[in-house]
Image (cartoon, grey):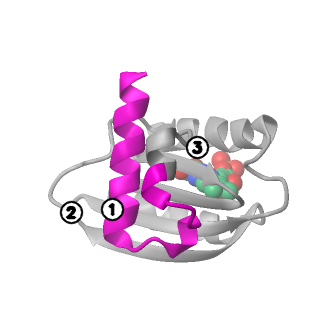
Amino acid sequence: MLQRAIYVSDAATGVGSNLQSLAEILGVSAVNNRRDRLFGALLHHEGRFLQVIEGGRVDLDRLIRKLKADARHSNLRFLTDGPTPARRYGDEPMRHLPMTTGGRALLAGRGLDSLDLAEAESLLTELQRLDAAA
Ligand SMILES: Cc1cc2nc3c(=O)[nH]c(=O)nc-3n(C[C@H](O)[C@H](O)[C@H](O)COP(=O)(O)O)c2cc1C
């Protein structure tokens, strides 16, 4: 059965805010996720990551173990991690979602860490929509 996990984490200093560090994460993720049939979207904003990953339980668990051990971020807080009837966040192995004006409006000055599940899903949907329209 399809699973979905969404978490927020604290980026290590400098990680995610420069293109090189982001490109490293996105590059490896795209290769691995395609192999493992995982679908993800990643957003970095003011020192925090928000990531959604959808796929099978075994592959998702293996990735979560790697994510928890990755020193480029810490303090992973899962807003959800469980079965879901359908994929909702696109069909790419790993998508980067840049912050947009609409996304900032949803955040209203708050950090990614202040979002509850419904707000995080709204933000992901909004950024995905704008990204697709761009
Ligand atoms: C914020 C963040 C998101 C990541 N997302 C993924 C991901 O979706 N898929 C993935 O394989 N690795 C992801 N990684 C990297 C993993 O933590 C790990 O470094 C990588 O999977 C190791 O790949 P390897 O086993 O091929 O060496 C992410 C790392 C960070 C910091």
Q: Would residue 5 be found to the left or right of residue 70 on screen?
A: left
Pointer 2 or 3: first along the chain: 3
Whether residue 37 is visible: no
Amino acid at circle 3: Ser
Q: Quick one: quadrant of the N terminus? A: bottom left
For label 2, being within 8 Å of ligand 1 is answered no
Mark 3 surroundings: few (<14), some (14-19) or many (≥20) residues within 10 A = some
Q: Position of residue 44 (x, y in %)?
A: 62, 51
Vertical placement of residue 7 versus 122, above or below: below
- The answer to the question of whether label 2 and label 1 lie on touching residues, with beta carbons closer than 8 A, is yes
Vertical placement of residue 120 versus 130, above or below: below
Pointer 2 or 1: first along the chain: 1
Disc 1 designates what residue? Answer: 4
The secondary element bearing badge 3 is classed as helix
Residue at 46 percent across and 48 percent down: it is 103
Specify the label residue 45 is tagged with. Answer: none
Which residues are drawn in magenta?
105-134
* Nearer to us in this view, 129 or 52: 129
Q: Position of residue 32 (x, y in %)?
A: 55, 43
Whether residue 3 is visible: yes
Mark 2 surroundings: few (<14), some (14-19) or many (≥20) residues within 10 A = some
* Nearer to us in this view, 108 or 80: 108
Residue at 21 percent across and 63 percent down: it is 84
Mark 1 surroundings: few (<14), some (14-19) or many (≥20) residues within 10 A = many
For label 3, being within 8 Å of ligand 1 is answered yes
Disc 2 designates what residue? Answer: 84
**Magenta highlight on residue 68:** no
Disc 3 designates what residue? Answer: 29
